[in-house]
Amino acid sequence: MRWKLLFAFLFLAAGLALAGYSEYCFSRSGLSPVSIPILVSPAHITSKFFAYTSARYRIGVAFDDPEKLVVAKPASIADPDSRVPALLKASWTVSRGSRVIQHGSASEAIWRVQGQPFLEFGGFQAEAWQWYQLDVDAISYETRLAQANPRLTVGIWTEKASLYEPEFLAFKFATRIIYGLCLFIGGLLILSSLVARREALFAPLR
């Protein structure tokens, strides 16, 4: 009976540890692992994220309400080949541990990307199964840019980024099956131990 309880707690501990860590990684990974609203003009923004696959990642600012993006020339936002003054100043650094992977500053113009206005900071090549940290300093922008609700984003950037989604979903599914089995086996062992203990207590009365 004791060995059953021992293995039960080992399975439960492993399942809970894997569940907690994997769900934390899932919340900070995916096609777009970073998405932070820029509500004010913060002096510094830091965000850690997990690259589950080797891919090119793009850093920049998207807009939740692009129709509220006021520009000097209203016609320019309708022209996909024209640019809009960014009105935003920021520098950024991507690091892995103590090593700086890439750094740069915000673009001076907002361009249309996949039909939506986007202010590009830059990009970097990520390695699979690695944690990265994005640091953005001295963000300042005008009110007319703020009313479009800018959002700092980091996302996989390829011509077919959607091809990475099945891989991520399969990884999540497999991981959840593994920690689910650990928890299930641990629960069965505890239940089996309780049943065996109950039979041992009532055996003399039969």
Image: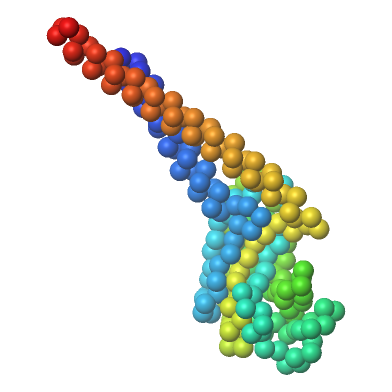
Residue at x 67%, y 82% (from the top left corner): 67
In-image side of 193 versus 88 (left or right): left
Q: Which residue is drawn at 79% across and 90% down?
A: 75
**183 w.r.t. 81: above or below:** above
One can see residue 141 in this view: no
> Along the horizontal axis of the image, is 152 left or right of 163?
left
Q: Nearer the viewer, residue 107 or 13?
A: 13
- Expressed as whole percent of the image width and height from the top left, the position of residue 36 reads 55, 67
Does residue 204 appear left or right of residue 40 in this picture?
left
Q: Position of residue 120 (x, y in %)?
A: 72, 71
Q: In which quarter of the image is residue 84?
A: bottom right
Name of the residue lying farthest toward the front: 206
Depicted 198 relative to depicted 140: above or below: above
Residue at figure coordinates x 49%, y 34% from the top left: 179
Quarter in which the C terminus is drawn = top left
Q: Which residue lies furthest to the right in this view?
A: 81
Q: Which of 154/131 is in front?
A: 154
Residue, far left: 205
Mark count: 0
Q: Quadrant of residue 60?
A: bottom right
Residue 37: x %, y % from top left: 55, 71
Q: Is residue 9 something one can see in this rendering?
A: yes
Q: Say how the picture is coloured.
A: rainbow
Q: Quadrant of the N terminus?
A: top left
**Vertical comparison of 98 with 150: above or below:** above
Choose between 126 and 110: the one closer to the eye: 110
Where residue 63 sits in the image (x, y, percent)?
Answer: 64, 75
Residue at (47, 40) in percent of width and height: 19
